[in-house]
Image (spheres, grey):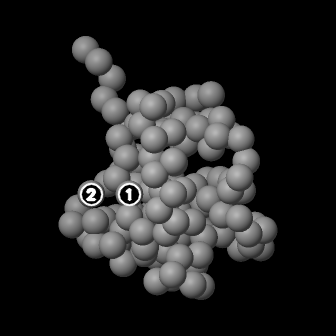
Amino acid sequence: MAARSRAILLVEDDPDNRTALSMLLELDGFTVVSYDGREAAMQYLGDGARPDVIITDLQLPDDPSGTLQQDLGADPALRAIPVVVLSGRDRPAALTPNVVAYVRKGGKPEVLLNVVRAACGRGY
């Protein structure tokens, strides 16, 4: 029996980055659902979706203060989902406990893949 594909929710406002990241993750065997903002992602999760990992930009046009990761950590139904923050900004001093990694944009793709694999329990 084949292992099930791990589901990733990708929240990234830049369409080129969203496409490139989706392709990278899909080529590594992940199933990717992507949205360009906080509201759409929260609607998807509110409809009952439970991805294995959530990758989100820290600052989105509809979430300039970066509250998505805080909202995920505050919701009992969502706080167990590992969150990977992907940002071009410096790491903020405080992140919620559900954030398992902070990855800088523009880095080596293998770094992000290793973080996501580890968050899914697939190891490096």
Residue drawn at x 51%, y 57% is 16
Q: Quadrant of the N terminus?
A: top left
**Image position of 124 (left or right of 122):** right
Query: Could one spot residue 54 in this view of the protein?
Result: no
Query: Could one spot residue 21 in this view of the protein?
Result: yes
Up-down: is 25 above or below 94? above
**Image position of 57 (left or right of 49):** right
Element class at badge 2: loop
Residue hosting label 1 = 34
Residue drawn at x 55%, y 42% is 116
Which three-letter amino acid code belongs to the residue tagged 1?
Answer: Ser
Give the crowd class for mark 1: few <14, some 14-19, many >=20 residues within 10 Å: many
Q: Which mark is residue 85?
A: none
| Residue lying at the far top of the rendered structure | 1
Element class at badge 1: strand
Residue 25 pos. (x, y %): 48, 39
Residue drawn at x 47%, y 62% is 15
Residue hosting label 2 = 49
Which three-letter amino acid code belongs to the residue tagged 2?
Answer: Ala
**Image position of 4 (left or right of 14):** left
N-term-proximal mark, 2 vs 1: 1
Residue 66 pos. (x, y %): 57, 78
Q: Quadrant of the C terminus?
A: top right
